[in-house]
Image (spheres, rainbow, N blue to C red):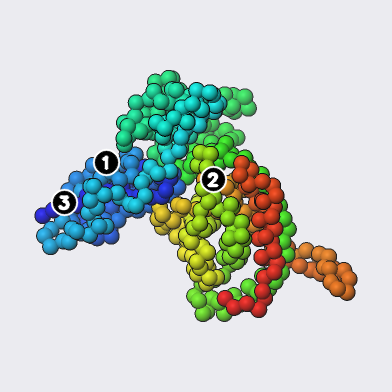
Amino acid sequence: MALVDLIMPKLGESIIEATILKWHKKPGDTVQEDETILDIATDKVDSEIPSPVQGVIEEIIYQENDIVPIGKVIATIRVGEGIDLTQKDILPSNDSKLNEEDPFEMEVPYYPPLESDTFKKNVDNDTARFYSPLVINIAQQEGISMAELENIIGTGQDGRVSKKDILAHVASKGNQLNFDNSNSLQNNNSKQEVNYLLKKENIPTASIKHDPNSNVEIIEMDRMRKLISHHMIESQNTSAHVTSFAECDVTNMVKWREKIKKDFEIRIGEKITFTPLFIEAIVKSIKKYPLLSSSIVGDKIVIKKNLNIGMATSLPDGNLIVPVIKNADLFNLVGLTKQVNGLANSARAGKLKPDDTTDGTFTLTNIGTFGSIMGTPIINQPQVAIMAIGVIKKRPMVIETTDGDSIAIRHMVYISLSYDHRIIDGSLGSIFLNEVVKELENFDVNRNY
């Protein structure tokens, strides 16, 4: 008999912990290889964790609602004789890394709200302390100075300040934060603020319990909506958002898709939407202007050579998630179509894996699906740009020809690009946007798929 450790897996470059939502097994239960043992949640997606081996649950170390660092043993499984325990995916050595990448590799120096000479001196010091993005966000929101942060005793790996450490420090100051399992921040004074607003609007506070006689209804945000709210605010606070717009004639693309879509579905077994066609044009344009596939770490610009394109996807409950097509530049149109459809179907069925929503370098959102003609999307951190495609509409347009101008009915769409003005100036943003427009307008109606 032997024991196999079940380890909280690495879930993405910037994720350092996850919350246990539900155990499907208890000590003494038999489990099959690849059978789901528990559900976990990160600040990006919920996911199921399968068993790496067949055996019996020996011990559950962390309970439901516990927040567990990546790499920690969360349970042990007793396996019988004859099981090959030398496989790296079952028993990683305690002396080796869980992956080639360190889960703390994306930590960056803390930059307080207001820089000071003392802070600059500390940052220049080779012994400057490093903190996770989560700790940085909490510190910035609470106005914790560099000196104050350095005085917090860390209980994390190598003495790092963990989320629990900084929350305990905030609580001791009287600014208690309610930090729920999904890493969504809620101010402790929110109840008082709600009561104040209700009183200001002459709404009885009893209505917060859904008083049937009240003319308002109070709906509690679900966990994902809280996450989205927190991420959007954080993005606005992090990036200097600028949005540029362009109109695009996609008549050739629309006619080509209409011509081939039935044959495409019969031969490939997939329905082709406009999304893979837009992604194809985006990838070609990023190759010409790689700064659009980058991020900012401290005062450094990190250009990502793997073009991982996120595609905003609406869920049946009205929430939004952004699965990522990894290495989108390596797929042809058929491959992109399969990736788009597969990820969209998995998202709507709640079957996305943690890795499906990580490592994005650029995001596309098709707001035209819901009838919007244009929008100003918020950047998906830590990316530096996001593109929105509006609804495609027929409009009369002036067409320039060698024989003079004429008016024709064309399929037109508005495209917007929100970008981080800290590193992308208006000129580059506009040039890239118009490069995408050029790719779409010059679509080859005689191409094969």
Residue 7: give its label: none
Q: Where is residue 49 in the image (x, y as percent from the top left)?
A: 32, 53
Which residue lies at the image location 61% right of the left edge and 60% below the top edge? 288
Badge 2, how many Cα within 10 Å: few under 14, some, many 20+? few
Q: Can the viewer see residue 229 in this picture?
A: no
Residue 3, label in figure: 3
Disc 1 secondary structure class: loop
As drawn, 256 above or below 122: below
Give whichever of 338, 333 is nearer the camera: 333
Residue at figure coordinates x 67%, y 70% from the top left: 443
Q: Nearer the viewer, mark 1 or mark 3?
A: 3
Where residue 157 sits in the image (x, y, percent)? 31, 36
**Upstream in the sequence, badge 2 or badge 3?**
3
The span from disc 2 to disc 3 (Cα, nearest Å) is 45 Å
Cβ–Cβ under 8 Å for marks 2 and 3: no
The residue under label 2 is: 301
